[in-house]
Amino acid sequence: MSKLIAKEKDIVVPGEVLAEGMDNLPSMGTYREGDKILAGRLGMVHIDGRTIKLIPMSGKYNPKRGDVIICEVMDINFGGWRVNTNSAYSAMLSMRDGTSEFIQKGADLTQYFNLGEHIIAQVVNVTSQKLIDLTMKGPGLHKLTGGRIIEVSPYKVPRVIGKQGSMVSMIKRATNCQVVVGQNGLVWIHGKPEGELLVEQSIRKIEKESHLSGLTDAMQKFLEKETGVKLGTSAKVEPSAKLG
Amino acid sequence: MGYKKRLNDRAFDEARPMVAKVGVIKKADGSAYFKFGNTWAYAAVYGPRNLYPKFLQNPSTGILRCNYNMMPFSSVGDRVRPGGSRRSKEISMVTKHALLPALNLEDFPNSVVDVYIELPETEAGSRTAGINAASMALADAGLIMKDLVASVSVGRVDDKLVVDLDYAEESYPDGPVADIPIAFMPGSGKISLLQMDGLVSKEQMKEVIEMGKKSCQEIYEIQKQALKDKYAKGGNNE
């Protein structure tokens, strides 16, 4: 007789029994041992029909193809730039993917991206040995000048962005700042100092209250109180919001 | 003679009061502390991250490094000299081997997960407290784990078998003492650490393991609750 022990949205720890019997299927973050399905990491249970999976709630950023991330240039090689991705592995930005300009043989690559500078780049490929290739060719991908960078947990990035970018676009409108949220948890904020501070405060608040429902409304109230400006009731979704 | 009543009024199969908390170190990727009475272990996990020097890298899996350290003022006896000792090196090694069976680092080739165990206060049972804290910290760091690891020391004081010896019992003057730290994976029921200091009979050893398993089950519940408490409140470090 099959039995489902875990409930939707339960927080489970490694080794906890999620289900007994063969009627359910283990998916991401879970494993089967005998006729039991157990949790293979700490996470939140998501039951989709017969499959049980775990939504991770902590850990380092795991690079995936297509992610737009914010990176710091940490080294320059013959073929391009090595950048820190805020994950367990560094990534390679090759010369041909770094810029569309023609680069002369032996040219000084620091002209394009110097050590310590930050860039917005997109993950092109991740190999099994976790070699990561990046590109800078695409809309919204560029070098970052000015502003500040803060770090949030990569698992809270979806909350910071909001549904179809509603949260981040609301913060942008309220503070008049440019905000780019990288999938790796780094956030670039650029604007007037007061605005930048308010964005940081807002993001810290989102981080702290990420588990509560009605977060967008709470944030709207917070931003209205801080800026003294009434924001529109329905957060307008900008087409560019998806990127950042 | 015989050991009729425990020096600290505990039942023979009762561990010292236990406290566990997860997410206690803000900068760490995972952190926790675990207390057995006055024995207090902090664990901080960093990684998976780049591993240098490069010859230590393993292209088929990530590696685990553990570091056990007693703070200079932690012990009841003399000041502990800072830096590694033969003892701390051994405990770091057994801690690593106690945790590894629960961990799967194959998704992180060439990288390292560092576990730092620091003990601000010790009164026997420090390696077991360290393992308990480290296993919670590893789960907090979001690593792929088959199971948590719970650990306790069971021992013999004179003619009795007791769970979680404290310092007074370990140095019991009127009879033989044995101290047997056990680490146990409660989900699968496997043992990942078994050491012995002192002597027990074969029959007693079997009983020791049963007592250890039972006590680890209680520890496991405390670890589980500590982890859930953190994530029910949004999973922020303090």
Image (cartoon, coloured by chain):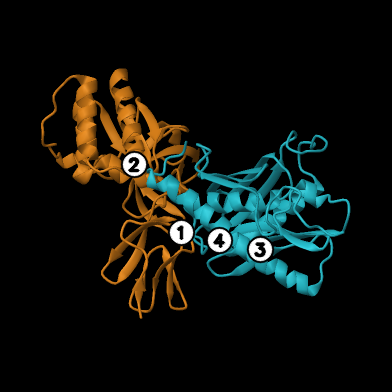
Chain colours: A orange, B cyan
Please tell me whether mark 3 sits on a helix, a strand or a loop.
helix
Tell me the residue that label 3 is attached to: B212
**Are there few (<14), some (14-19), or many (20+) residues within 10 Å of tag 3?**
many
Tell me the residue that label 1 is attached to: A41
Q: Residue at x 76, y 60 (%)?
A: B155
Tell me the residue that label 4 is attached to: B103
Whether marks 3 and 4 lie on the same chain: yes
The kind of residue on which mark 3 rests is Gly
Is residue A112 visible to us here? no
Q: Quadrant of the N terminus of chain A?
A: bottom left
Marker disc for residue A182 = 2
Q: CA distance from mark 3 to mark 1?
A: 25 Å
Q: Quadrant of the C terminus of chain A?
A: top left
Residues at circles 3 and 1 in contact by the CB criterion of under 8 Å: no
Please tell me whether mark 2 sits on a helix, a strand or a loop.
loop
- Give the mark, 3 or 4, whose residue is nearer the N terminus: 4
Q: Residue B13 location, x and y as percent? A: 67, 59
* Chain at numbered mark 2: A
Whether marks 4 and 1 lie on the same chain: no
The kind of residue on which mark 2 rests is Gly
Q: Quadrant of residue B74?
A: top right
Q: CA distance from mark 4 to mark 2?
A: 29 Å
